[in-house]
Image (cartoon, helix red, strand yellow):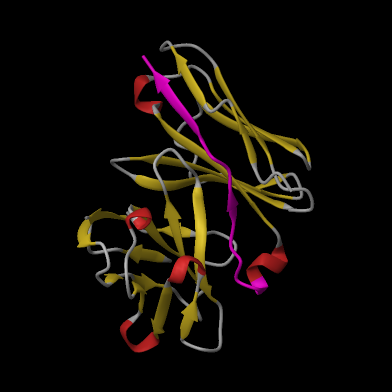
Amino acid sequence: AQSVTQPDIHITVSEGASLELRCNYSYGATPYLFWYVQSPGQGLQLLLKYFSGDTLVQGIKGFEAEFKRSQSSFNLRKPSVHWSDAAEYFCAVGARKLSFGAGTTVTVRA
Amino acid sequence: DAGVIQSPRHEVTEMGQEVTLRCKPISGHDYLFWYRQTMMRGLELLIYFNNNVPIDDSGMPEDRFSAKMPNASFSTLKIQPSEPRDSAVYFCASSTPSNTKTGDGYTFGSGTRLTVV
């Protein structure tokens, strides 16, 4: 069975500071991994994905994520957070069917 | 492309009434997914279709829920009768097999916020 755990429900970060969101997955084969972002009242937007190849993947809005097979992790990072990054972030795993984590809410303080 | 289009954006209905949510996937996408999002349970996959055929409906919570895809450009999710615990945001998403190979995942609609009072 495939599943995703996002250990952090809520993270508060200062504008300009770095951000790291954790994601651990369970999947029977080489995983397809995704990070989505959801702004209030909006649908989910794809930030980045890992399919194969380089374990460090770049996404939109300055985000990157690193796939670590040995740790079953796919953590999302951003070096310098902007106020507009305040949102909820979802990690997902799967091929045809995606399983989503519970999400991490990011608050950005001035 | 206009993306995945869902209607209505908001729906308020009384308990016991029938509710129909609508989704228009992206043209050319042959997979369509219905998800439900609540604070308590997060994002749950309800059902998905491939080429208009339901493939997996194991996430449909009860017989009160039904989904159809009469053609490649339209799908409905119906709740009859509705109950207060059905209050949630319902998302539709679409995809293609090439999206899987390239890892592009799904494209989500903006959702329908359903409130059953």
**Is residue A58 positioned above or below B112 on the image?**
below
* Quadrant (top left, top right, bottom left, bottom right) of the C terminus of chain B: top left
Q: Is residue A29 visible?
A: no
Magenta run includes residue B108:
yes
Q: Is residue A95 visible?
A: yes
Image location of residue A109, percent across then percent down: 21, 55
Side of B4 where A76 appears, left or right = left
Image location of residue B12, percent across then percent down: 45, 16
Side of B72 where A59 appears, left or right = left
Q: Which residues are magenta?
A: B101-117
Side of B110 where B88 appears, left or right = left
Image location of residue A85, percent across then percent down: 36, 57
Choose between A49 and B53: the one closer to the eye: A49
Choose between A49 and A80: the one closer to the eye: A80
| Residue found 58% across the figure and 43% down from its top | B109
Q: Residue B14 lies in what quarter of the image?
A: top left
